[in-house]
Image: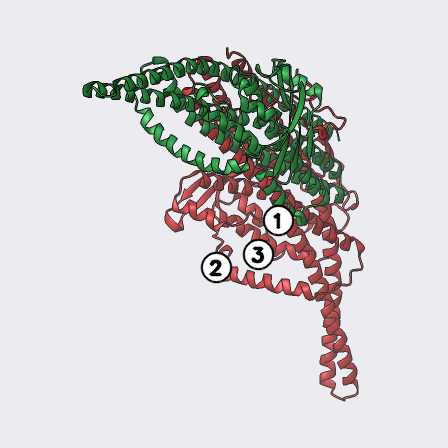
Chain colours: A green, B red
Amino acid sequence: MTSTLDDSEKEKARSVSVDLNNDASLLIDIPDALCERDKVKFTVHTKTTLSCFQKLDFSVPRQHEDFIWLHDTLVETEDYAGLIIPPAPPKPDFESPREKMHKLGEGEATMTKEEYSKMKQELEAEYLAVFKKTVQVHEVFLQRLSSHPILSKDRNFQIFLEYDQDLSVRRKNAKETFGSFFKNMVKSADEVIISGIKEVDDFFEQEKTFLLDYSSKIKDSTAKAEKMTRSHKNVADDYIHISATLSSLSVDDNTALKKHLEKFADLFEKLRKVEGRVASDEELKLTELLRYYMRDIQAAKDLLYRRARALADYENSNKALDKARLKSKDMAQAEEHQQQCLQKFDKLSESGKRELTSFKGRRVVAFRKNLIEMAELEIKHAKNNMALLQGCIELLKSN
Amino acid sequence: MAAEMEPPPLGNAGETDFRELEDGEDLFVSTVTTLEYPEPSSPEPASLPAEDISINSNGPKQKDVSFDDDPEDLFAEATEEVSLDSPEREPILSDGPSPAITPVTPTTMLTPRMDLGARCRIEEDNNGDTFDIHIAVSDPEKVGDGMNAYMGYKVTTKTSMTIFNKNETTVRRRFSDFLGLHSKLASKYLHIGYIVPPAPEKSIVGMTKVKVGKEDLSSAEFVEKRRSALERYLMRTVKHPVLLKDPDVIMFLESSELPRAVSTQALSGAGILRMVNKAADAVNKMTIKMNESDAWFEEKHQQFENLDLQLRKLHASVESLVCHRKELSVNTASFAKSAAMLGNSEDHTALSRALSQLAEVEEKIDRLHQDQAYADFYLFSELLGDYVRLITAVKSVFDQRMKTWSKWQDTQLLLQKKRESEAKLQFANKPDKLQQAKDEIKELEGKVEQGEKDFELISKTIRKEVSRFEKERVKDFKAVIIKYLESLVQTQQQLIKYWEAFLPEAKAIA
């Protein structure tokens, strides 16, 4: 299945986006994508005025693994240690709609044709929603990079955008996954050591405390929000079955109840559409918001850890220097090493402070936008429901 | 105007707009903002079902008994045969002559129905009583301890009808008393074609929890469910013009002491006999091949089979809805707590405040979902459950007719055999045996005649009963549908209120 979003939609989208993709010198988007079984092929489209690129307007096909490769490469780049690397987009996950589709196939015999086709429609919509979400999340990742003053100039990023052959990263990825597994292990060990390190800077002390706590809370909220929106979807699905059976009852009925049942069935069908949108809006505005920032907070934490490691390195180099002075051996070396560590640490601290401050601003703005939009949509849907319900009640009472 | 649904991250690829929904109807036009709706009070879980059910059972305080297809006055038939003085519990309707047509007494009133504004006629029977009775089942109280404990319920009857001794009576009854009442009514009336409303079902699991003294939410829910079901059962029973006048019913409602109905226990002798009879009936049903001469019965039988299937299916779907809505409530509450913690952890003051407000909104919404689940259950689901059981009673009445026919046919066959053997005896020169045969034949002829009358009577009764049943069904469903929709409206109204209160908080994030 392909998804093509026309220009007017994107214009609207960009006008309310939170300072992304505004710089006309480098505009990136994913205008369409193809879904083949499990694999999603994204078309990454770039429009640029920068001279470092060979063309002004070009597109390349990319797979999810290519994005991961780009992300990991950036994380491993020493120079970017002081930056918050935008979190990698999660793997496209069609598990949930696929499972539901399977269950639907099994239950087909127990439903009427109408019921079955409605359920199928719902599922297809769900599939489409997952698909659109994954396109967005991949697009946002690239746009975060392109709007970052330093990261947008990264050579690998440019390769990703431009290289029109297959980025044969799969072999690399195999090594990488092993490597990254190791790295994760080392990182968690680091976490333990580093949270024990005495912080010299108030700002970072506060940030550390905040981020550690917030990270676990937002993880919990994301999971709970997901469960909540899923329950909401279940309720909407039940409405489908109820509507279908009411419809059958109405057809067979030849008493004064016939019209009532018909209208009642009709109402439920309309209600479930609204409920379905309530569920999906909640998912987009709330669950996805939380999910995104959960990952972003992890990226901020990673920055803190890198800085803490640099601090640890610096402290160790101090100790080594003292030792060298005592032994009067290799002092120059030790001094130089110590200077390097200090420099690195200072650089990370400076850049880190900048990044974390702008991160907070970004987060607050995004939460505000989404909470407002969610509340507005909830009100809209509830008013709709009420209109439908009251209309039906009027109709039934007048009969 | 399509809805904008943008994903939360900093940018977005486009709208997840479900185009297929734009089927001419613009669902998202902002409609009535000035709603002239009385501001509903917050529904509390305990009061909502009780209030609604009492209205439901209050329902039409007047009885609509004008049968368009039958000029006979059903009340007349009942008053002819009901004798309040008769001490015995034999079938009250004797095998008497067919009911005579009684003209409706001239003081028929036209009274608007209280709830739906429709009109109905009230027929006055010979006693001058109009149908006016309201029964409430309340105040469940545990009596006794351990496995012999039981739940006692207060049954309050308010009426102006003269067949009752007082205008208001209160008695205490236990569950087996209700079952006993039903058992008696069934034995008296089912086999002559009256649709006797079934009593609520037993529940060993539910009652054991109560006996054991588990004071948790599920026990309380179980007791409330049962209380409500018992109330509906009694109201349905007294709405039946014949059953209302039955001495057992009146005694049940009025007499302070009632002999314990032991025969309703599952493992009693009577219980086992019931099970055996049920099995026998099932076998018989399969073997009786009735020549249906009346297309009406064939048609109705099929109709009720269909209705049964559909109602069961709908009931299952609604039960699923109740379950999912309860889940939604629980998950919303859980999210609310999590959001509160997140708000506490948030270091940006305004956002922290907004998140706390969000948590509060979600907490209120979770209670809203819970209330809606109650309404889903007590209004919608229980109605369907009641009708599934009622239709079982209807089907059994059809079966009784088959049995009556079968009995008649058997008697006829027997008569034929006797005639044949009498013919043989004519030539056998055994005057004693011959006389005996002639006597037997006379007796059988009488029985055949009676069998035919019984069959015709039950057929006629069933026609009337089905007509009455269908009218009740239409009334019940219409009333419940509207009430249920109103509960949905209430929920949406509250949602609007809550989110509108939250919106400025979200906007205040600076």
Estimate how packed mark 2 is, as few (under 14), some (14 to 19) or many (20 or more) residues with alpha carbons within 10 Å: few
Q: Nearer the viewer, residue A328 or B424?
A: A328
Mark 2 and 1 residues: CB-CB less than 8 Å, in contact? no
Disc assigned to residue B389:
1
Q: Residue furthest left?
A: A326
Q: Nearer the viewer, mark 3 or mark 2?
A: 2
Residue sitting farthest toward the bottom: B429
What label sits on residue A54 in the rendered view? Answer: none
Q: Chain of mark 3?
A: B
Residue type of the residue flagged with mark 3 = Glu
Query: Is residue B249 placed above or below B32 in the rendered structure?
Result: below
Quadrant in the picture for the N terminus of chain A: top right
Q: Amino acid at mark 1?
A: Arg
Up-down relation of residue A253 to residue B298 (above or below):
above
Residue B170: tell me if it is visible: yes
Query: Does residue B252 appear left or right of residue B83 in this picture?
Result: left
Element at badge 2? loop
Q: Which mark is residue B88?
A: 3
Marks 3 and 1 on same chain = yes
Query: What chain does badge 1 belong to?
Result: B
Q: CA distance from mark 3 to mark 1?
A: 29 Å
Residue on which the image places disc 2: B267
Q: Quadrant of the C terminus of chain A?
A: top right
